[in-house]
Amino acid sequence: MLLQDCSESLQDCSESLHERTLKEVRNLIGKVKNGSLESLEMVDTLQRHGISYNFEKEIKSILREHFTWTCNGRSDSDNIYEIALRFRLLRQEGYNVPADVFECFMSQDDNTGKLTFDKKMTEDIIGLTSMYEASLLSIDGEDMLHEAAMFSKNALTASEKLFSSASADTDINGTNSPTLKELVKNTLLNPFHKSLPRFNSWSSKVYPQGPYEWTEAFRKLAILDSEMVASINRREAVQVTRWWKDLGLAKQLNFARDQPLKWYTWSMAILPDPKLSKERLDITKPIAMVYIIDDLFDVYGSLDELTLLTEAITRWECMEELPDCMKACFRALDDITNEISNNVYMKQGWNPTYLIKQAWKDLCDAFLVEARWLTSSHFPSAEEYLRNAIITSGVHVVFVHLFAHLCEDVTGQDLDMLNRLLAISTPTAKILRLWDDLGSATDENQEGRDGSFLDYYIKENHNCSMEGARKHVMEMISDAWRDLNRECLFSPSVLKLLAKVSLNTARMVPLMYTYDKDGCLPRIQTYMKSLMFNASD
């Protein structure tokens, strides 16, 4: 009892300090001049520290002012760092800033007549990092941003040759600041747009802001916030583990994956706001069932049994002919669906049961199509495989649950919103499926039947090597990112939160599907530690 009282007292003190620091930071934000570079760097720092959710109103006000200045032609800076930073922050916020803001840094090539970036820019390492970060928010058809990405990436990669000299290893902003070498390395490996802020919050120490009056206060808040979030994550992890144990599927389906913390990590990543605790716990459950049903199809069931399971889920009826493990799976799925539907009804005022059941039916139909291909030795075209594999990724079924939980003032009868939901989730599903199919290693302890885009692509393109196929897949992933950028930029306001979730899901994919030679996931293990055991400093 005494230990509990001490723990609660410490928590109260920590929360009080957190609140005081929040107030201090809010006051500092209010002092910054509108339309200034400092205000942009302030927003960037808040986001890189993973604490921007505390200041959404202030950030919207700052960026709205910058957008107004940009539209009125009042932003006359010729600093590529500032222009690229403003462009990136505005695009992230959903402002459709035209890519031609970079045209002033281009000139006509004497030989080709094409517009190219001035080679003198290669001397501005900090400006190049900002340009590269901004270029990753391009959408299809923005050739200028594609040129900016290629130019800045090539220049930054080439700049590594300078790092052997003393000048290239000097501080960015003075004594004890990070070096240009660290800045370039982090920008190329972990660009902000494709990284998870909390996992990569240390990048705020590498990126060149300040020094400003608010720098230390932001760092202090980031540490306090990280401690608070880690405490919440640990508590939720215990709840997820208990739920999974009580569900009993680990014993009944001993061939299936038993990884509740890994499944919860998806929820931590895609819903980082501490206030969304109930939503994280709920979403972990369908994520777990996607993995379990995947194992039923890939590892356990015969084609006849899988056909029965698909029929049972289509009819939503626990058929007597099903094997016991499939009956257990169906009952768990039914219980989870009823529980979540009730939670949504209490929160949003509508019942998503039909929508959720339809999503599970679509998933199992797609799994069954793949099972029939593999059983009959049918080889679909790579395109046909990918269309089906986007569904078997499980992304859409999870996003239906997210749609029900997060989107206010919509219902399952709103067909336009449902079509937009599909448009938002499809690029992310493609990114996940293609990353998974890159085949860098086999998932832990899994020896199931599985197709692969790489295999089907090589069968169609006989002269293509595995290296060439992998390069093609990476280009497809880049294309999918541009599609995702478009959906995030033009999604209706009611789906903006879901668009951010889609971004976070895509950012999480490389962590979840980059295996080492032992079939383990070192990056995701590091990520879990960073979220559950404060690693901010």
Image (cartoon, rainbow, N blue to C red):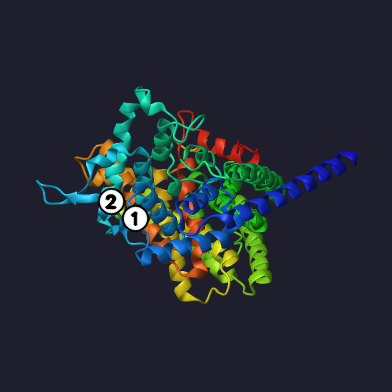
Extreme-bottom residue of the structure? 413
- Left or right, 48 with reference to 466: right
Q: Is 322 situated above or below 530? A: below
Residue sitting nearer the eye, 468 or 34: 34
Instruction: Please indicate, yes or no, whether residue 359 appears anywhere in the rendered image.
Output: yes
Residue 145, image x, y percentages: 30, 53
- Left or right, 470 with reference to 280: left
Residue 178, image x, y percentages: 48, 32
Instruction: Please indicate, yes or no, whether residue 469 appears anywhere in the rendered image.
Output: no
Neighbour tally class for label 1: few under 14, some 14-19, many 20 plus, Cα within 10 Å: many
Q: Is 24 situated above or below 446? A: below
Neighbour tally class for label 2: few under 14, some 14-19, many 20 plus, Cα within 10 Å: some
Q: Could you tell me which secondary element the residue under label 1 belongs to?
A: loop
Residue 138: assigned label: 1
Residue 70: assigned label: none
Evaluate if marks 1 and 2 touch, with contact meaning CB atoms under 8 Å apart: yes
Residue 473, image x, y percentages: 32, 45
Question: What's the amino acid at mark 2?
Answer: His
Residue sitting nearer the eye, 265 or 14: 14
Instruction: Measure the alpha-carbon separation of dots 1 and 2.
Output: 7 Å
Question: What's the amino acid at mark 1?
Answer: Ser
Residue 89, image x, y percentages: 44, 55
Residue plotted at (61% across, 37% down)? 535
Q: Mark 1 or mark 2: name the one nearer the start of the chain.
A: 1
Residue 146: assigned label: 2
Residue plotted at (65% across, 38% down)? 533
- Left or right, 467 with reference to 49: left
Quadrant location, the C terminus: top right
Q: Is 133 situated above or below 184? A: below
Residue sitting nearer the eye, 25 or 493: 25
Label total for image: 2
Quadrant location, the N terminus: top right
